[in-house]
Structure formats: C-alpha cells, structure tokens
Amino acid sequence: MSELRDTFVKPDAALEGANELGAAGAQLASAWSNAGAAINTLNGGKPWGDDEPGNEFNKNYLGGDQPAQQVLDLLADLVPLVEVLGPTVKGAVEGTVDTDEMVKTLFGGDDK
C-alpha cells in the first residue's frame, strides 16, 4: 500500500498562477473568436469557387467529417474549456484555504 503524504500549497503562488492561467485562457478565447469568425467568413465566401471543382474541393475540405472541419469543431469545443481552467483552479485553491481555516477554527491549531 502506498503511504499517505501531506500536500502543501502556497496559496499566494497558486492564486497568482491561477490568475495567469485565467488571463491566458481569456486571451486564447479572444484570439480564437476573432480567428474562427474570420475563417468562417472566408469559407462562407467559397473562395475556391462554386463550380464543380470548387464544390468538390469544399466537400473534401469542410464537408461532414473532413479534417478542416474537425479542427474547427475541436477548437470550438476546446477553447471554452481552456478559458475556465484559471477560474476553476482559483476556486479550488480558495476552497482549500477556506476549508483549512474552518478546520483550524473548529479544532484549534497554531500559526506554524
């Protein structure tokens, strides 16, 4: 059996990291919003043409489960998850600190 070990967190450093992660997630979301909109606008204009070769290209480029569409769909699903990582970590750290403070208040303890 494995031995249980204490885990120590430096709350200030963890919160700073969570804030940086949150800022990075927000930047990614903003960049993806702009890039995704531009890509969709360009693709909507069918720059490859609306003739038979152009339609064939579109079918193999964006149609159904084609790689380009899969990448666009994946990013649309992934970016919002990355965007909430920072706030989620921040909430977890704050919850841990609050729990530690509650335990200290209920059961006593020193400030060591």
Image (cartoon, rainbow, N blue to C red):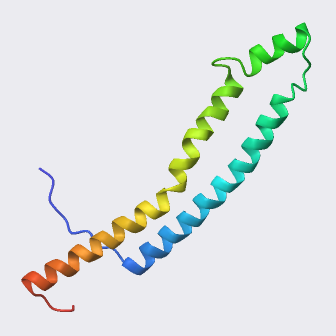
Percent from the top left, x then y, of residue 23? 59, 66
Is 15 placed above or below 112 here? above
63 left or right of 42? left
Report the residue that reaches farthest toward the top.
Answer: 52
13 left or right of 48? left
- Residue at horizontal 29 percent and vertical 76 percent from the top: 97
- Residue at horizontal 55 percent and vertical 48 percent from the top: 80
Q: Which of 9 and 79 is in front in this view?
A: 79
Percent from the top left, x then y, of residue 79? 58, 47
Percent from the top left, x then y, of residue 14? 42, 73
Q: Which of 81 and 4 is in front in this view?
A: 81
Question: Which image quadrant: the C terminus?
Answer: bottom left
Is 111 placed above or below 106 here? below
Percent from the top left, x then y, of residue 95? 30, 70
- Count of picture labels: 0
Q: Nearer the viewer, residue 8 or 35?
A: 35
Quarter of the rendering containing residue 111? bottom left
94 left or right of 104? right
49 left or right of 93? right
- Residue at horizontal 80 percent and vertical 18 percent from the top: 58
- Residue at horizontal 92 percent and vertical 19 percent from the top: 49
Quarter of the rendering containing residue 74? top right
Report the residue that reaches farthest toward the left.
Answer: 107
Is 62 placed above or below 77 here? above
